[in-house]
Image (tube, rainbow, N blue to C red):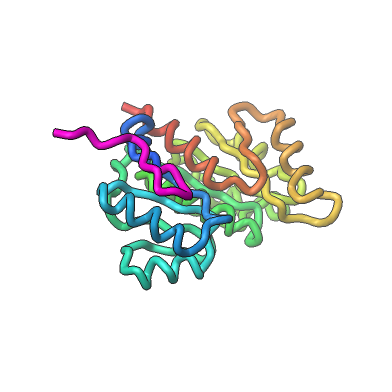
Amino acid sequence: MKKTPEVKDIGFAKLDFARRARTGFGETVFGPGKTPEQMVGIFRAFREKKLPVLATRCTAEQAEALAAADVPVRYDPVARAIASTWGRNKKLKGRVAVLTGGTADIPVAEEAAQSAEFFGATVDRFFDVGVAGLHRLLSQLEAIRRADVVIAVAGMEGALPSVVAGLVAVPVVAVPTSVGYGVGAGGVAAALAMLNSCAEGVSVVNIDNGFGAAVVACRMIAQRK
């Protein structure tokens, strides 16, 4: 039998069909810069191999093109994510809690939550539990502590991950967002605050990188026996 090549060159993209075999997680496509027609070509190629594929930072136009081409996907306009509905990833034995400092952080948090769900994690959402009203976080603390990894998403001064890390016994993945006023410098202030956290067990991904946080969290719980 002829071996299926690991990489398929479709002209405008080289598709990695072996990523799930290597890393345990299916391929992810970065949506910006790709035309709707290119997105259709990519998803069709993965469907032919029955391999799951996720696309991030996508537009409604890209999702509409996939629907018009009868490619079965799920699109969420808040997370801006397009996920295939075939070839699902293996269910992970662990829970991820996704927290936000405020409502404005939800798009990044949903990117994290839906990416983690795509990769097989069970996700619990705790939105608008920032430090401006600490009682909101404390009222959810018992439920948050059931998670195996916490993703804390916050802009402004970025204090949420530090507070959470001092209250839970699991790793905290901090996601700075570009939410905030001018001196926040598009999330730089939050990122620096998180990098300088005095709380133990905090790791930090790039500004607005909900997807990256989801991958870190899922790789952590994938190690559980």
At 86% across and 50% down in the image, what residue appears? 183
Extreme-front residue of the structure: 11
Query: Number of labelled discs?
Result: 0
Quarter of the image with the C terminus in it:
top left
Q: Position of residue 90 (x, y in %)?
A: 29, 41
Residue 107, position as x, y percentages in the image: 58, 58
150, above or below 43, in the image: above
Examine the structure image and report whether residue 104 is included in the region drawn in magenta: no
For the point 63% across and 61% down, which residue is it?
103
Magenta residues, start to end: 1-14
Residue 69 image-quadrant placement:
bottom left
Quadrant for the N terminus in the image: top left
In the rendered image, the residue lying farthest to the left is 1
Q: Main secondary structure of the magenta part?
A: loop
In the depicted view, which residue is nearer to us: 213 or 69? 69
Give residue 223's position: percent from left, percent from top. Answer: 38, 27
Query: Is residue 13 shown in magenta?
Result: yes
Picture residue at 52% right of the left edge, 55% below the top: 31
| Residue occupying image coordinates x 33% and y 51% | 45
Q: Is residue 50 left or right of residue 193?
A: left
Up-down relation of residue 199 to residue 98 (above or below): above
Left or right: 184 in relation to 74 = right
| Viewer-closest of 211 and 134 | 211
Q: Nearer the viewer, residue 4 or 56?
A: 4
Tell me residue 205's x, y (percent).
61, 38
* Residue 117 in sight from this viewpoint: no
Q: Is residue 61 visible?
A: yes
